[in-house]
Amino acid sequence: SQTIHQWPATLVQPVGSPLSLECTVEGTSNPNLYWYRQAAGRGLQLLFYSVGIGQISSEVPQNLSASRPQDRQFILSSKKLLLSDSGFYLCAWSVRWGQYFGPGTRLLVL
Amino acid sequence: ILNVEQSPQSLHVQEGDSTNFTCSFPSSNFYALHWYRWETAKSPEALFVMTLNGDEKKKGRISATLNTKEGYSYLYIKGSQPEDSATYLCAFPGGYQKVTFGTGTKLQVIP
């Protein structure tokens, strides 16, 4: 069966510091991978998606970037965090229909 | 941009009441519809994947129906319990398996 891992689970970072969140998927090959964010009091916002290694599509202009160095690895990064980057970050994968989510990372930027 | 709408936006029911809410989606180029149960700051939990017109799925006290011709799905909860309190999301796959999520129905079950 497929599983999806995210780490860390919780992160507190100062404004201006870099960020790296990692997501890995097991039990499937060539999945589509996604990064979502839920800001406080808001719904799910799609940030990036990837249909293959090195292929990244950005949904909204922002302070973040994503990379897919391996088939089942998806990384969300920032060079300098902003206060507005605080939120709950979810990685998801899909094959065919629907999406399946990882456990999430709660990021607090102070 | 796909238009996936859910109604109502929020709902308060008494413990033991049954309730239902709606997801509307484009009826053309239908592939599937997903329902998720989502508690804030947790990972959305997949409830149902619905693919065929007339589909009816059930999981415990929760069930869902699908009408692809008219573009809607209903989610029903029978005998609501406080632990059912959550946001219920429907999701509609599009190109590149990008999924458009509805805005959700936030359910609060009052003990």
Image (cartoon, coloured by chain):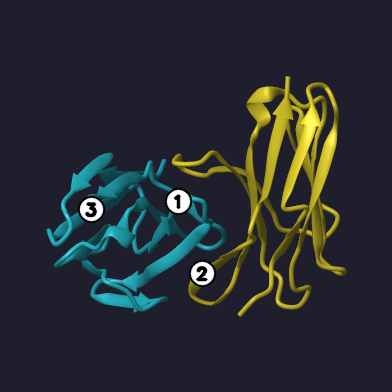
Any part of residue A8 in sight: no
Which subunit holds the residue at mark 3? A
Whether residues under marks 2 and 3 lie with C-beta atoms below 8 angstroms apart, the answer is: no
Q: Amino acid at mark 3?
A: Glu
**Amino acid under label 1?**
Ala
Residue at mark 3: A22
How far, Cα to Cα, is label 2 from label 1?
26 Å
The image's mark for residue B97 is 2
**Quadrant of the image occupied by residue A77:** bottom left
The subunit carrying tag 2 is: B
What is the count of numbered marks?
Answer: 3
The local crowd at label 3, few if under 14, some if 14 to 19, many if 20 or more residues have their Cα within 10 Å, is some
Q: Which mark is residue A28?
A: none
Q: Which chain is yellow?
A: B
Q: Position of residue A46 (x, y in %)?
A: 45, 66
Residue A27 seen by the camera: yes
Marks 1 and 3 in Cβ contact (< 8 Å): no
> Of callouts 1 and 3, which one flags the residue occurring earlier in the amino acid sequence?
3
Q: Chain of mark 1?
A: A
Q: Nearer the viewer, mark 2 or mark 1?
A: 1
Secondary structure state at the residue bearing disc 3? strand
Q: Which residue is mark 1?
A: A40
Chain A tint as drawn: cyan
Q: Is residue B102 left or right of residue B77?
A: left
Are both tags, 2 and 1, on one chain?
Answer: no
* Identity of the residue drawn at 38% across and 41% down: A103
Q: Residue at x 45, y 51 (%)?
A: A40
